[in-house]
Amino acid sequence: MTRTTYTCDGCGARLDNEKDLTKEDGRVRPSWKCRRCQTSVPPVVAERLTHQKQHGRE
């Protein structure tokens, strides 16, 4: 399976797992932000990243 990665629009950081994100609880579903600069990450991308294990160990 191909790993999902995302380049943050705010700081250019490469996001590839849940540790790179900050979760903010919402009313319907949580929102996700880059841990470094707090720029919003698209929900679909964030959900994929949260289900990946760190450093490619799946």
Image: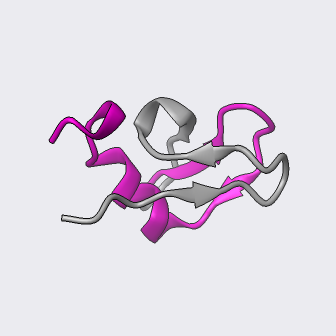
Q: Is residue 2 above or below residue 15?
A: below
With 23 as the anchor, is 7 left or right in this view? right
Image quadrant containing the C terminus: top left
Q: Across the whole image, how many numbered discs are drawn on residues? A: 0
With 28 as the anchor, is 7 left or right in this view? right
Estimate the x, y position of residue 52 in percent, counting from the top left. Answer: 28, 46
Please say whether residue 51 is one of the residues in the magenta stretch: yes
Residue depicted at x 47% and y 56%: 46
With 10 as the anchor, is 57 left or right in this view? left
Estimate the x, y position of residue 26 in percent, counting from the top left. Answer: 52, 51
Image quadrant containing the N terminus: bottom left
Residue depicted at x 71% and y 54%: 8
Q: Is residue 36 above or below residue 10?
A: above
Residue depicted at x 79% and y 50%: 12
The image's colour scheme reads one colour
Q: Is residue 54 above or below residue 34?
A: above
Please say whether residue 49 is one of the residues in the magenta stretch: yes
| Magenta residue span | 30-58
Residue depicted at x 70% and y 55%: 40
Estimate the x, y position of residue 5 in percent, counting from the top left. Answer: 49, 57
